[in-house]
Image (tube, rainbow, N blue to C red):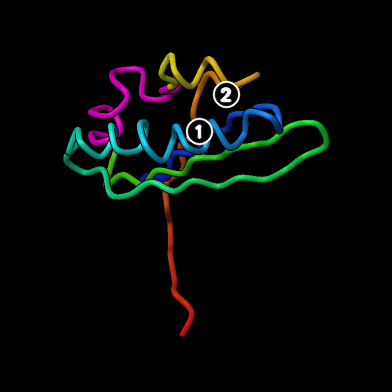
Amino acid sequence: MILRLWHGWTTPALADRYETLLRTEIFPGILARRIPGFLRIALCRRALEGEVEFMTAMWFSGPEAVTAFAGEDGEAAYVPASAREVLSRFDARATHYALREEREAA
């Protein structure tokens, strides 16, 4: 399993707008693609001094699924134009990790 992490930052004034965009346009668009091997996506948010950081985490069954999502350069960031309008900066490349073990609390 592959875990894909990506970060983007925006101003406090635009943070709610960006989160709404993720929830109503970007995530539904990704899910609508029905990519084989794409398992789930999560949104994380934290306030920093003067900016707000967002992190998305995506789980894929393997490298083929990542390629189906991102293309041949699987680490290239997926940042639609609508997101670029409200982000002040973002990772140009996503980071991928091989999930080695996962446990749930009893």
x and y, in percent, of residue 65 in the image: 24, 36
Q: Is label 2 in a helix, a strand or a loop? A: loop
**Does the magenta segment cover residue 73?**
yes
* 101 relative to 80, above or below: below
User: Residue flagged by tag 1: what amino acid is it?
Assistant: Thr
Q: Name the residue under label 2.
A: 91
Query: Badge 2, how many Cα within 10 Å: few under 14, some, many 20+?
Result: some
Q: Is label 1 in a helix, a strand or a loop? A: strand
Is 72 left, or right, of 98 in this rendering?
A: left
* 101 relative to 27, above or below: below
- List the single residue furthest toward the bottom: 106
**In contact (CB < 8 Å): disc 2 and disc 1:** yes
x and y, in percent, of residue 67 in the image: 27, 27
Q: Distance between the residues labelled 2 and 1?
A: 9 Å
- Dividing the picture into quadrants, the one containing residue 79 is top left
x and y, in percent, of residue 56 in the image: 49, 40
- Dividing the picture into quadrants, the one containing residue 21 is top left
Query: Badge 1, how many Cα within 10 Å: few under 14, some, many 20+?
Result: some
- Dividing the picture into quadrants, the one containing residue 32 is top left
Identity of the residue drawn at 37% across and 31% down: 26
In this view, the mark in front (2 or 1):
2
Identity of the residue drawn at 44% across and 71% down: 103
Q: Mark 1 points at which residue?
A: 95
**Does the magenta segment cover residue 105?**
no
**What range of the chain is rendered magenta?**
63-78
